[in-house]
């Protein structure tokens, strides 16, 4: 399997001149926070929006859920909205923002990868289906023209690099 790599071009071509510390993957992981924050985010996708329900459904401590919700709100993935039931004090619900909703393909990819490579003791437990046609939902890498794209067909360059140019450098295998 060695040799399957992403082609680097433009200022990315010289791998020794740039750092992963400010790359999109590092920034995304920082926004997501610890793995338990991703579980909180996933729970929001399942319709959970009240603090007590996050605690109960995730079987996490109140302090851990509080910290994760704060992080996800600060990162812009959730928004905190007040609500008040009759005779009760004001409390808050948490809802996905557009930024949080746009992570759906990433979460589908994580679920699909986990079910494929890390199935539970009882085997696969999750099947995602399209409500419109009942077919399986999968995460795939495609170009904007709709072509499936393999890892070794990806070219990483700057947004200002002209498309279709010859890659300046192909990272070595392994």
Image (spheres, rainbow, N blue to C red):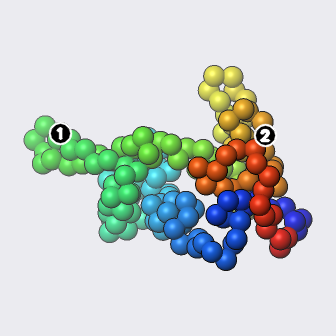
Q: Position of residue 133 (x, y in %)?
A: 69, 22
Residue 86 vs residue 72, the one in the foreground? 72
Q: Position of residue 159 (x, y in %)?
A: 59, 49
Q: Residues within 10 Å of mark 2 (few under 14, many from 20)?
A: few
Q: Is residue 82 left or right of residue 119?
A: left
In the rendered image, the quadrant that contains the N terminus is bottom right
Mark found first going from the N terminus, 2 or 1: 1
Q: Position of residue 45 (x, y in %)?
A: 48, 44
The dot on residue 148 is 2
Quadrant for residue 81, please give it. Answer: top left
Question: Is 151 rendered above or below residue 99?
Answer: below
Dots 2, 1 in contact, CB < 8 A:
no
Looking at this view, name the residue that lies furthest to the left.
87
Q: Is residue 114 visible?
A: no
User: Element at badge 2?
Assistant: loop
Q: What residue did someone put label 1 on?
A: 85
Q: Is residue 82 left or right of residue 60?
A: left
Q: Position of residue 50 (x, y in %)?
A: 32, 48
Eye-nearest disc, 2 or 1:
2
Q: Residue at x 81, y 63 (%)?
A: 170
Q: Residue at x 58, y 73 (%)?
A: 19
Residue 55 vs residue 142, the one in the foreground? 142
Q: CA distance from mark 2 to mark 1?
A: 49 Å
């Amino acid at each position: 399997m060695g040799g399957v790599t992403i082609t680097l071009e433009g200022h990315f071509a010289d791998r020794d001149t740039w750092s992963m510390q400010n790359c999109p993957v590092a920034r995304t992981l920082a926004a997501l926070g610890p793995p338990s924050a991703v579980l909180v985010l996933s729970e929001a996708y399942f319709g959970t929006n009240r603090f007590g329900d996050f605690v109960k459904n995730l079987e996490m401590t109140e302090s851990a859920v509080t910290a994760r919700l704060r992080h996800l709100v600060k990162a812009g993935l959730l928004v905190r909205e007040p609500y008040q039931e009759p005779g009760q004090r004001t409390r808050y619900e948490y809802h996905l923002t557009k930024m949080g909703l746009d992570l759906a393909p990433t979460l589908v990819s994580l679920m699909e990868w986990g079910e494929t490579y890390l199935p539970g003791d009882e085997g696969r437990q999750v099947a995602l289906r399209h409500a419109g046609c009942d077919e399986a939902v999968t995460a795939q890498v495609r170009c904007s023209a709709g072509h499936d794209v393999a890892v070794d067909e990806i070219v990483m360059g700057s947004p200002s690099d002209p498309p279709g140019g010859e890659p300046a450098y192909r990272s070595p295998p392994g």
